[in-house]
Image (cartoon, grey):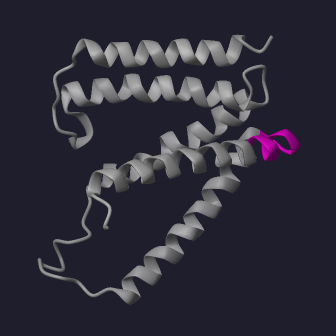
Amino acid sequence: MPMSGRSTDWLLAVGGGLLLALMINTNSLLARHTTPLFASWAAHGLGAAAAFILVVLHSRLSRPRGGDEEERGKAPLWFYLGGIPGALTVVLAAITVNSGLTLSGTIALMLVGQVLFGIVLDHFGLLRTPKRRIVAADFLVALLVLVGSGLIIFGRG
């Protein structure tokens, strides 16, 4: 039985979260032995190399299907600025993981930030996301994640 698109999305999101936790832990270990800035450069340098290899492999293995070849692959220049928040995430996570927050507290608070920023993006339709009205349940989700984060951080008795 094939997976529906929605369940595949859920599995990919959970897999992305697992990889994010692994990345943050690995980068924080590197930052502990070097500096957070070096850990960020190392992570993004390896990521850039892996992305380059994947792009080359993809371009060799796939042929354009439909659409004008010149039109495809042209993204606005600001789309390439996505690496800046990623680099800051790595640096800040490397610093906080090595603090009293530890890995679980850092990831929990990062989740709070992602939920709140996602609510703002959805409401205003920023970064080409579809506009969505904010409902009370959105704030309830953010509050519950924040309370859970507090339990993770302060409940280590």
Instruction: Classify residue 55 by image quadrant.
Output: bottom left
The residue sitting at the front extreme is 1
Instruction: Find the magenta span and give its range.
Output: 28-35
Residue at image point 20% right, 26% down: 124
Residue at image point 28% right, 30% down: 121
Quadrant holding the N terminus: bottom left
Residue 56 versus residue 110: which sits nearer the camera? 110
Left or right: residue 69 compared with residue 87: left
Left or right: residue 100 compared with residue 147: right
Instruction: Classify residue 70 by image quadrant.
Output: bottom left
Residue at image point 53% right, 77% down: 53
Residue 102 in the image: x percent, y percent? 74, 27
Left or right: residue 48 compared with residue 105: left
Quadrant holding the C terminus: top right
Residue at image point 32% right, 49% down: 78
Residue 71 in the image: x percent, y percent? 16, 71
Residue 90 in the image: x percent, y percent? 62, 41
The residue sitting at the left extreme is 67
